[in-house]
Image (spheres, rainbow, N blue to C red):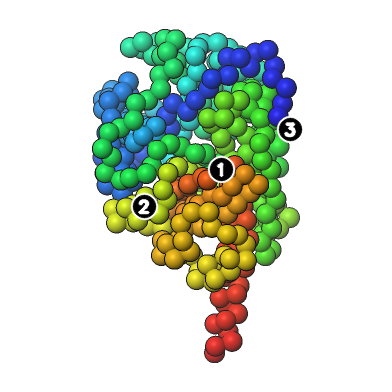
Amino acid sequence: MANIAAPGDRVFANMGLDHVMLYVEDVRASVDWFTRCVGLQVVAGPWTDQLHSQVRSVTLGRGQIRLVLAQPLADDHPGAAYLAQHGDGVADIALRVWDATSAFDEAVGRGAAPVAAPTTRAGVRTATIMGVGDVTHTFVDYGGSTGVHADVSDPPVPGLCTTDHFAVCVEAGQLDPTVAFYEQALGFSMVFAERISVGGQAIQTKAVQSSSGAVTLTLIEPDASKDPGQIDQFLKAHGGPGVQHIALATDDIVETVAALRDAGMGFLSTPATYYTMLADRLTLARHTREQLQALNVLVDQDHDGQLFQIFAKSVHPRNTVFLEIIERLGAHTFGGANITALYQAVEMQRAAQDDGR
């Protein structure tokens, strides 16, 4: 159930996702990978190609997607400490608002920890608070305008258009406090909750979303009473909570994934038995089973429709942060049934192999 809006929530009413900032060890290498394999382009903007005394940054974009890749150049820059603990990763999820000062004051008044007080540069006002773990949120406003990004024209990879959600891993016992923080400090609402048990492992996930619906965080915690799984592995390798993956939306996942694969992006494979069992789970609303199987694309559905998704292989040295590609046909959930379906498919495939010995 959505929270009843507090009077102060009006400062967050039109919130949007402005950009995502990642600290990287080598900005040139990162730009090369995101442009060559993901199909993003270097774009003009207030953070593009800046060379300061302490950080070098480049802004990349495609459709409404904006990523800022920042390489610290000084040992005492906060990004240097971030990289030492986590390696390359998402350090800031910037939120576009009408008034950054009001948003900052409201969030801090509700308990958010301040990081950077409001400041204006080149007509753009920003202010920063702490979010989950050491991921920050920078409020951005463009002097009363919406600041909506213009689409990048003629992208080399078709389909990618916007950022669907962020998957954020938190330590066991921290899921509910994190949900409460976003509800209280930023006026988010919990829009989805699910417990997933697979074999001896289990996770709990809750999604929080801005009142505008434009910013969604899928928060995930491991069940400490069960066997360690991938969330535990992420928390250990990443050095604490943080963004596990960024989901980028497309209007045609078959076309997009084929192009991304040809451009050099690697994706996780799916056992053939997953597709053999697919007809027992649902009737495809778009694409064919053969198309999905050829590309290892997964499909799930909820009461509102279907979604198609695929997870890229992490290229991170610690095997942590990665990308998801997603197409929604009305569905509002996040493909939780695919985890169970994949587990069942692997078990069926293993049994078939054992019988064939």
1 or 3: tag closer to the N-terminus: 3
The tag earlier along the polypeptide, 2 or 1, is 2
Q: Which-is-in-front pick, marks 1 and 3?
A: 1
* Residue 346 position in % (x across, y down): 57, 70
Badge count? 3
Residue drawn 39% across the image and 32% down it: 64
Q: Which of 154 and 143 is in front in this view?
A: 154
Q: Residue 255 carries which label?
A: 2
Q: In which quarter of the image is the C terminus?
A: bottom right
Query: In the rendered structure, which amino acid carries the disc numbered 3?
Result: Met
Q: Where is residue 71 in the image (x, y as percent from the top left)?
A: 33, 34
Q: Which of 16 and 109 is in front in this view?
A: 16
Residue 173 figure quarter: top right
Please provide percent x and percent y for residue 209: 60, 32
Q: Is residue 73 visible?
A: no
Q: Which residue is drawn at 40% across and 22% down?
A: 148
Disc 1 on helix, strand or loop?
Answer: loop
Disc 2 to disc 1, C-alpha distance: 19 Å
Q: Name the residue under label 1.
A: 330
CA–CA distance in space, label 2 to label 3:
37 Å
Residue furthest to the bottom in view is 357
Residue in the picture at 46% in, 33% down: 91
Q: Residue 290 carries which label?
A: none
- Badge 2 amino acid: Glu
Relative to 297, is 29 on the left or the right? Answer: left
Residue hosting label 3? 1
> Where on the picture, by quarter, is residue 39?
top left
Q: Position of residue 273 (x, y in %)?
A: 54, 71
Query: Looking at the image, can residue 282 be seen?
Result: yes
Residue type of the residue flagged with mark 1: Gly
Quadrant into which the N terminus falls: top right
For disc 3, the neighbor class at 10 Å (few under 14, some 14 to 19, many from 20) is few
